[in-house]
Amino acid sequence: MARTAITISEFILGIVGSLALLAFVAGGLMWMLSAGNPEWVTRGKQTILGAVIGLVIVFTSYMIIQLVYTALDIKKAEGGKWSTSNWFNSP
């Protein structure tokens, strides 16, 4: 059960990262191609800001999942790491 949840969360993180990259590109293009039109500049800035806020939410949820799994000691029960990333593991 836990392995399935881990696989799903890793998949979702990959999808969200890809969507954030697309939002950055779209917002940057809107801003660059606005030709001084304040409406398009505002839309581009809002798109980039939305991508940043989304990434902050996703990485915060990643840290919360890590905290819960560490606090409940689920890693030992599953026989390994909850994620393949070593970002938050101490050396």
Image (cartoon, helix red, strand yellow):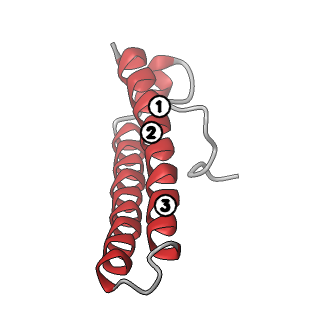
What is the quadrant of residue 74 in the picture?
Answer: top left
Of badges 3 and 2, nearer the viewer stands: 3
Give the mark nearer the N terminus: 3 vs 1: 1
Q: Secondary structure at mark 3?
A: helix
Is 46 placed above or below 21 here? below
Q: Which mark is residue 13?
A: 2
Is 75 placed above or below 28 here? above
- What residue is disc 1 on? 10
Q: Residues within 10 Å of mark 2 (few under 14, many from 20)?
A: some
Q: Looking at the picture, which amino acid does disc 2 mark?
A: Leu
Q: Between residues 36 and 21, which one lies in front from this camera angle?
A: 36
- Residue sitting at the far right: 91
Q: Looking at the picture, which amino acid does disc 1 mark?
A: Glu
Q: Which mark is residue 24?
A: 3
In what quadrant of the picture does the N terminus appear?
top left
The answer to whether marks 1 and 2 mark residues whose Cβ atoms lie closer than 8 Å is yes
Q: Residues within 10 Å of mark 1 (few under 14, many from 20)?
A: some
Judged left or right of residue 2, residue 31 is right
Name which residue lies at 36% across and 83% down. 37
Of badges 3 and 1, nearer the viewer stands: 3
The answer to whether marks 3 and 2 mark residues whose Cβ atoms lie closer than 8 Å is no
Q: Looking at the picture, which amino acid does disc 3 mark?
A: Phe
Q: Secondary structure at mark 2?
A: helix
- Residue 64 percent across, percent down from the top left: 34, 50
Q: What's the distance in space between the residues labelled 1 and 2, CA to CA?
A: 5 Å
Q: What's the distance in space between the residues labelled 3 and 1, CA to CA?
A: 21 Å
